[in-house]
Amino acid sequence: MRIVLMGAPGSGKGTQAQRLVERFGIPQISTGDLLRDAVARGTAYGLRAKAAMDAGALVADEIVLGIIRERLGDADTGRGFILDGFPRNLAQARALAAMLDSIGKPLDSVVLFEVDYAEIVRRISGRRTCQRCGRVFNVHTHPPGSPPHCEQCDDHPALVQRRDDEESTVQRRLQVYEEQTRPLAEHYAAQGLLRVVHADAPVDEVTARLLAVLQP
Ligand code: AP5
């Protein structure tokens, strides 16, 4: 299964990708996570990506495509993958299609999560992430304890709020999404790949809707 999850910031791509990893045993490839990791490790890619991420803008295609090309070459993608947050513009979509065509493994489907603007702002303001395992929590739906800590990791490390989840940066990310990423829905609809999931519902319900649209 080779799929793309697309949707606005906070629409639940990462949360649902983790559910699919557990169910299908194929890897989640999140360009946001890969870029945050590169920033944390201070790699050449990370140093170049940081300013764009802090501003809520897209990181240069050349950097993102370099990271994706490397990651898709890893052995664990042989049975499939879940692309989370990539592609994000037409140039990335075309580059991805060329990469996958060259190995004879095109995409099976592209899922678009649709969520109300007000709900997105609420979800993002409550998001907390474990820096160790990357698992995502939300203080509104699942209070993580006080002080907030990860329940999955043995030593229960503290949860943190993402730098780009400040309100002004979120507004910019939403604008970038509308201008550059949302139009990809039409691109994929024209290819018969697009599946729309109304994701204004509890996590389990969204997972059920997602699995339904992924049925062959
Ligand atoms: P990235 O990390 O991809 O962020 P994003 O697309 O803005 O998406 P988010 O991670 O904010 O949200 P999500 O949809 O995964 O929601 P989540 O599941 O966490 O990108 C960050 C930055 O990196 C970009 O701004 C850009 O600079 C750069 N970048 C990344 N990819 C790039 C690319 N391809 N090209 C160029 N630049 C790139 O859920 C959100 C919260 O809601 C959580 O707390 C969760 O617990 C909660 N929640 C989830 N589902 C539900 C539900 N059904 N009900 C209630 N709460 C829910």
Image (tube, rainbow, N blue to C red):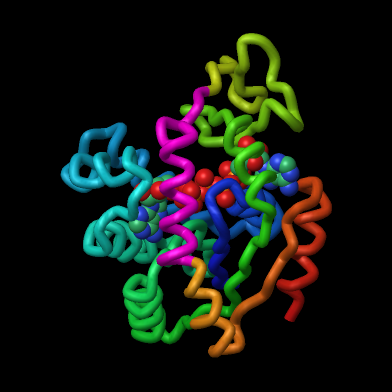
* Rendered image quadrant of residue 138: top right
Q: Position of residue 168 (x, y in %)?
A: 43, 37
Task: Tell me the residue at 39%/69% (across/down).
Answer: 89
Task: Tell me the residue at 59%/17% (across/down).
Answer: 156
Q: Left of 130 or right of it: where is 115?
A: right
What residue occupies the far left of the structure in this picture?
44
Q: Is residue 14 visible?
A: no
Query: For the N terminus, which image quadrant?
Result: bottom right
Q: Left of 165 or right of it: where is 156?
A: right
- In front: 214, or 203? 203
Residue 11 lies within the magenta run: no
For the magenta stretch, what is the residue range? 160-181
- In front: 189, or 183? 183
Residue 108, compared with residue 86, is above or below; it is: below
Residue 177, compared with residue 204, is above or below; it is: below
Task: Tell me the residue at 43%/86% (across/down).
Answer: 104
Most common SS among magenta residues:
helix
- In front: 61, or 109? 61
Q: Position of residue 96 (x, y in %)?
A: 38, 75
Q: Is residue 142 visible?
A: yes
Residue 199, compared with residue 10, is above or below; it is: below
Total label count?
A: 0
Task: Tell me the residue at 25%/46% (across/down).
Answer: 49
Residue 115, compared with residue 123, is above or below; it is: below
Q: Position of residue 42 (x, y in %)?
A: 22, 34
- In front: 168, or 143? 168
Q: Position of residue 182 (x, y in %)?
A: 51, 68
Query: For the C terminus, which image quadrant?
Result: bottom right
Residue 171 lies within the magenta run: yes
